[in-house]
Image (cartoon, grey):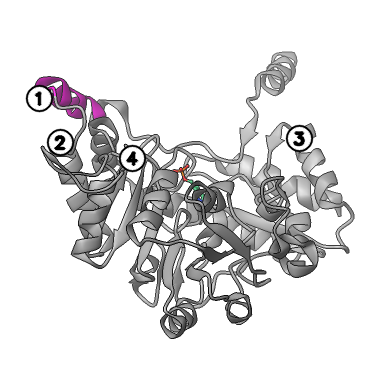
């Protein structure tokens, strides 16, 4: 018996699957099949079909926002939002984000102007924005990084004073609220991503949240080649439409997302409790009044931790745990951006420092407690 146990332990260790940063949340397949049957029955696969209309309405209600336009993915949504608001020239943005934020500017022929971030939230530092405004500035594009709310009131005040548009990359902010208000209420427009790795997914997908019917109509023309009706093309639009498969999945995912977020937040709590007192390791705190979505669990590895960030990364890899350095390298250090004056590391000291220290630990609804405890144990055993 003892020997059997011994061998089965080895076998278990040998067949143990790697742990990834995230795993997409999927509803039970049986629940999705009736939706598929309906699509096969109707033969309507895209172009604003019945599921598209239902999902847009359901999402509008769930998020408590006035207007939603669905897209094939978040990047196309952001590119189209910039077009809809006729943003040109220069846009003030953060270097501490995913490449798509800044790429959406370049695809529109817009010059990004990088401004440093705050150490507590990893978001655009509102106190540095005004100094970066020039006569060519037309908009501010902040990111609610890891779902941490930006200082939206102050940013709106600056935008109003200087006549700038304010567009949020809210790809991390699904379901996050502050003082009972959704973060998606902020700015002229906000972009959501429903990519597989996000808190809410439709395999791929995205949306623009807005407050103005005319802008929603323009977004809807632009995502459909510029067609206003069968014979009228009002703009050189793109194909950014969400299809019926994505929309049907989105409808079903909405029924599960609260429970998926609750499961994430239980893991967030477990990490926080266990790691709070580890010298040299800092968890980013959740600000007062914020209901988070626990999409990410970033820690900052300080000088007084026995290992450097990259050594800790390697240590996890030895245990087959695939942690990620989000966000490293900084977008401003990529070849297509580092020529801009604002991309100089001396202009971005906080972002540069955090990019060297950050590590995101695995977090997703189905991550089991034993694995979470193993991850915690690896960190504690280093001390
Ligand atoms: C995921 C992500 C995007 C891109 O969204 P896609 O749906 O993958 O196109 C943009 N910005 C941020 C901050 C993201 O995390």
- Residue 269 visible somewhere in the drawing: no
Q: Eyeballing the image, is 53 above or below 188?
A: above
Q: Nearer the viewer, residue 327 or 212?
A: 212
The answer to whether the residue labelled 2 contacts the one labelled 1, judged by CB atoms less than 8 Å apart, is yes
Q: Which mark is residue 238?
A: 4
For the residues marked 3 and 1, what is the alpha-carbon distance in whole angstroms? 48 Å
For the residues marked 2 and 1, what is the alpha-carbon distance in whole angstroms? 9 Å
Where does the image place residue 279, in percent across and percent down from the top left?
82, 65
- Looking at the rendering, the stretch of residues picked out in magenta corresponds to 32-43
Q: Is mark 2 within 8 Å of ligand 1?
A: no
Query: What residue sits right under mark 2 in the picture?
Result: 49
Looking at the image, is mark 2 or mark 4 earlier in the sequence?
2
Q: Quadrant of the N terminus?
A: top right
Q: Residues within 10 Å of mark 3 (few under 14, many from 20)?
A: some
Q: Nearer the viewer, residue 352 or 316?
A: 352
Q: Residues within 10 Å of mark 4 (few under 14, many from 20)?
A: some
Where does the image place residue 274, in percent across and percent down from the top left?
68, 59
Label 2 element class: loop
Query: Toward which corner of the image does residue 153 lie, by quadrant?
Result: bottom left
Q: Which mark is residue 317?
A: 3
Which tag is nearer the camera, tag 2 or tag 4? 4
Where does the image place residue 224, in percent across and percent down from the top left?
25, 40
The answer to whether the residue labelled 3 contacts the one labelled 1, judged by CB atoms less than 8 Å apart, is no
Label 1 element class: helix
Query: What residue sits right under mark 1 in the picture?
Result: 42
Looking at the image, is mark 4 or mark 3 earlier in the sequence?
4
């Amino acid at each position: 018996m003892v020997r059997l146990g011994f061998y089965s332990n080895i076998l278990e260790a040998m067949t143990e699957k790697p742990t990834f940063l995230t795993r997409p949340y999927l509803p039970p397949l049986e629940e999705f099949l009736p939706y598929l049957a309906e699509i096969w029955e109707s033969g309507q696969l895209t172009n604003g079909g019945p599921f598209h209309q239902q999902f847009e309405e359901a999402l509008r209600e769930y998020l408590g926002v006035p207007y939603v336009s669905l897209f094939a993915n978040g990047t196309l949504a952001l590119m189209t939002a910039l077009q809809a608001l006729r943003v040109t020239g220069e846009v003030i943005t953060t270097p501490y984000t995913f490449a798509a934020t800044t790429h959406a500017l370049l695809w529109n022929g817009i010059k990004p102007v990088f401004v440093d971030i705050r150490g507590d939230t990893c978001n655009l530092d509102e106190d540095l924005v005004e100094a970066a405004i020039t006569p060519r500035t037309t908009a501010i594009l902040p990111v609610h990084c890891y779902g941490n709310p930006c200082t939206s009131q102050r940013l709106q005040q600056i935008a109003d004073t200087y006549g700038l548009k304010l567009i949020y990359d809210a790809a991390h902010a699904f379901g996050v609220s502050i003082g009972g208000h959704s973060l998606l209420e902020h700015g002229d427009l906000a972009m959501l991503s429903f990519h597989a790795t996000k808190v809410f997914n439709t395999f791929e997908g995205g949306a623009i949240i807005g407050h103005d019917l005319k802008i929603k109509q323009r977004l809807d023309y632009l995502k459909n080649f510029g067609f206003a009706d069968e014979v009228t093309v009002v703009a050189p639009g793109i194909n950014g439409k969400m299809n019926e498969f994505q929309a049907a999945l989105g409808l079903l995912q909405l029924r599960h997302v609260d429970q998926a977020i609750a499961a994430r937040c239980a893991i967030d709590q477990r990490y926080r409790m266990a790691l709070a007192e580890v010298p040299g390791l800092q968890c980013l705190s959740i600000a007062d009044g914020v209901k988070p979505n626990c999409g990410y669990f970033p820690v900052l590895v300080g000088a007084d931790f026995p290992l450097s960030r990259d050594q800790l990364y390697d240590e996890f890899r030895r245990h087959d745990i695939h942690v990620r350095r989000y966000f490293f390298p900084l977008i401003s250090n990529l070849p297509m951006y580092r020529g801009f004056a604002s991309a100089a590391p001396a202009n971005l000291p906080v972002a540069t420092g955090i990019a060297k220290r950050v590590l995101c630990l695995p977090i997703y609804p189905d991550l089991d407690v034993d694995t979470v405890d193993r991850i915690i144990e690896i960190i504690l055993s280093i001390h």
